[in-house]
Image: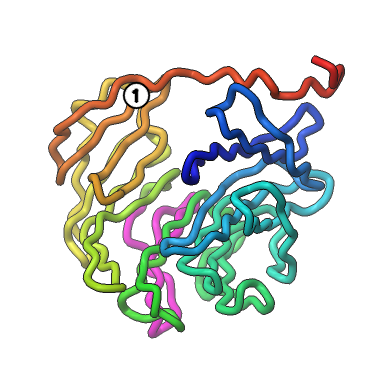
Amino acid sequence: QIYDDRLITGGVNAWFKGTLFYSDDMGDTETLVYESDGGRVTDMTQSLWDDPAIYACTWSDIVDGELLRSNDDGQSWSLITGHGHHAMNSVKALNHNEVFLAGDNYVTHTTDGGQTWESMKYNLPDYQGIYCMHVQGPVTALPLDEYTSLMVSNDNGLYKLDPNSEQWEQILSQSCKSITQDFIQIDTFIYWTETYVVTWDNRVLFCKDMDFDNWQDVTNGLPANPIDIEASYQGVFVALQGGGVYRSSGWDVVDVAPSMPIITLNAFPNPFNPAT
């Protein structure tokens, strides 16, 4: 992740423990700032609004994974507990207080910065680990309301939460590895308009119907398998396996970004010989 001019990276070392680094020169040098007791770092996010907090979560190893927060642009990280998860793979923050955490087979939610947590498992299937989560909503959506969109995917497919009934509705039978929604912003509210997913069988699906009845396959035109998708104010971007990013408008690919160079992290530590 890049925050201002700082590159923050999360990964795993040779001992299968999660690591967090920051770099102020785009990876020429890096500073190791955190080694997790849990496994690899699986996700990192910043609030949708102006909030300095950055969140990261890790998978489990011999011990449970961890939820972490940094308030100083990734220079130091503090542990957040009480959420009840063992292995986490997605964290999203609407603001400093409201955070969603996905792991194991359910989602937890806090509105007080992690002091207390509520489970949002409801009717999600048992024994189906969550692969990815998408959250989009207004800064004022406390508690969840009809303007907040919360989606998760497991082996059974894609689910969307109805906050009024507190029930998850299955809206797609394909399992997804990435979810995003195009949006418009009016004042402090973000309204989602179109939904895009990358499925585990390497397709990009698109739905403009708010009832999610009409999904279209828009993979055609991509020269490699899609691995991630993200919406921003500049459009919807698809990252491809092997490099390259496509920008899409609606369902027509309109622009291609050149393949991204692979940055060699010269300062990445060798755990067998820390001097190299």
The percent coordinates of residue 105 (x first, y second) are: 59, 60
Q: Report if residue 70 lies within the magenta region.
A: no
Q: What amino acid is found at the position of numbered circle 1 in the picture?
A: Gly
Majority secondary structure of the magenta segment? strand
Q: Quadrant of residue 127?
A: bottom right
Q: Report if residue 163 lies within the magenta region.
A: yes
Residue at 26% x, 31% y is 246
Q: Residue at the top extreme? A: 276
Q: In which quarter of the image is residue 234?
A: top left
- Span shown in magenta: 151-173
Secondary structure at numbered mark 1? loop
The quarter in which the C terminus is drawn is top right
Compared to 243, does 214 lie above or below? below
- Please give left or right for residue 276 compared with residue 130 in the image: right
Compared to 260, does 20 lie above or below? below
Residue at 52% x, 53% y is 45
Label 1: how many Cα within 10 Å (few below 14, some 14–19, many 20+) = some
- Quick one: 270 or 207, which is closer to the camera? 270
The percent coordinates of residue 187 (x first, y second) are: 25, 73
Residue at 46% x, 67% y is 94
Residue at 58% x, 53% y is 129
Q: Quadrant of residue 274?
A: top right
Q: Label 1 belongs to which residue?
A: 244
The percent coordinates of residue 71 (x first, y second) are: 63, 59
- Please give left or right for residue 185 compared with residue 157 in the image: left
The percent coordinates of residue 91 (x first, y second) are: 55, 57
